[in-house]
């Protein structure tokens, strides 16, 4: 398994905390949207999900 750079980790941690969801769920939701499966997004508001990555 690979780990993100500390800069990326800190951003993900902050974004998840601001939304009040666990980091793992935040990452899962971002990845689901990124690969074209927004129906699998559980917690994030689909309208404000940053899709341009």
Image (cartoon, helix red, strand yellow):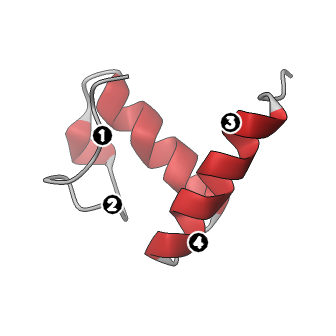
Local crowd at mark 1 within 10 Å, few (<14), some, or many (≥20)? few
Say whether marks 1 and 4 touch (CB < 8 Å).
no
Residue 44 numbered mark, or none: 2
- Is label 2 in a helix, a strand or a loop? loop
Q: Which residue is mark 1?
A: 50
- Which label's residue is closer to the chain start, 4 or 3? 3
- Is label 1 in a helix, a strand or a loop? loop
How far apart are labels 3 and 1 at the CA level? 15 Å
How far apart are labels 2 and 3 at the CA level? 18 Å
How far apart are labels 4 and 3 at the CA level? 14 Å
For the N terminus, give its image quadrant.
top right
From the viewer's perspective, is 36 left or right of 32? Answer: left
- Which label's residue is closer to the chain start, 4 or 2? 4
How far apart are labels 4 and 2 at the CA level? 12 Å
Local crowd at mark 2 within 10 Å, few (<14), some, or many (≥20)? some
- Which label's residue is closer to the chain start, 1 or 4? 4
Residue 17 numbered mark, or none: 4
Give how far across and how far down residue 37 sits, in percent.
Answer: 26, 32
Give how far across and how far down residue 32 sits, in percent.
Answer: 38, 35
Q: Report the residue at 84% width, 21% height from top.
A: 2
Q: Which residue is mark 3?
A: 8
Q: Report the residue at 67% width, 57% height from top.
A: 13
């Amino acid at each position: 398994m690979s780990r993100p750079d500390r800069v990326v980790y800190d951003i993900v941690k902050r974004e998840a905390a601001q939304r009040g969801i666990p980091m793992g769920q935040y990452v899962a939701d971002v990845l689901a949207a990124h690969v074209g499966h927004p129906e699998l997004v559980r917690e994030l508001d689909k309208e404000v999900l940053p899709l341009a990555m």
